[in-house]
Amino acid sequence: MPVRITPQDTPNPNARRLVLDRPVQEDSRGRYFTDPRACDDPLARAILEVEGVVGVMLLPNSVTVNKANEAFWEQLQPLVVQKIHGYFGP
């Protein structure tokens, strides 16, 4: 069954929380990544490769994505969701 993703706005207009219907990671502490070359997590690395994404925070059941000021959620969110679906598989 495909992963179900519920987007949520945050107080920061450049950040969006994506709540998943399955665990993202085992660790209860958040992990924040900004550089895909230095990132040891394959999901975070894939999302960071999307042009316009500048940061990814992984939490137990959600992913918070930070975008560049000049990027638009209307274009970024479908690409990020595609990366999440690709990571979790069909």
Image (cartoon, rainbow, N blue to C red):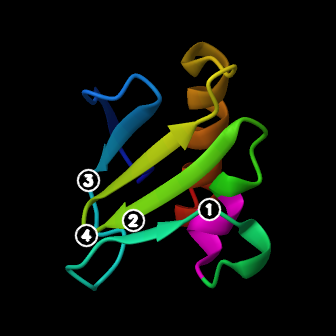
**In the rendered image, which residue does mark 1 sit on?**
34
Q: In the figure, residue 82 lies in which quadrant? A: top right
Q: CA distance from mark 4 to mark 2?
A: 7 Å
Sequence-wise first label, 2 or 3? 3
Q: Kindly identify the amino acid type of the residue bearing the numbered disc 3.
A: Asp
Residue 70 is left or right of residue 11, and the answer is: right
**In the rendered image, which residue does mark 4 sit on?**
60
Q: Kindly identify the amino acid type of the residue bearing the numbered disc 2.
A: Leu
**In the rendered image, which residue does mark 2 sit on?**
58
Asked whether 64 falls inside the magenta stretch, the response is: no
Q: In the figure, residue 89 lies in which quadrant? A: bottom right
Q: Report the mark closest to the observer, 1 or 4.
A: 1
69 or 40: nearer the viewer: 69
* Secondary element at tag 1: loop
Q: CA distance from mark 2 to mark 3?
A: 14 Å
Task: Residue 25: give its label.
Answer: none
Magenta stretch: give its range: 41-46
Q: Kindly identify the amino acid type of the residue bearing the numbered disc 1.
A: Thr
Q: Report the mark closest to the observer, 2 or 3.
A: 2
| Within-10-Å neighbours for mark 1: few <14, some 14–19, many 20+ | some
59 or 84: nearer the viewer: 59
Q: In the figure, residue 39 lies in which quadrant? A: bottom right
Task: Residue 21: give its label.
Answer: 3
75 or 70: nearer the viewer: 70
Query: Residue drawn at (41%, 54%), measured in percent from left and top?
Result: 1
Query: Residue drawn at (48%, 45%), measured in percent from left and top?
Result: 65
Q: Principal SS element in the magenta part?
A: helix
| Within-10-Å neighbours for mark 4: few <14, some 14–19, many 20+ | some
Sequence-wise first label, 3 or 4? 3
Q: CA distance from mark 3 to mark 4?
A: 11 Å
* Secondary element at tag 3: loop
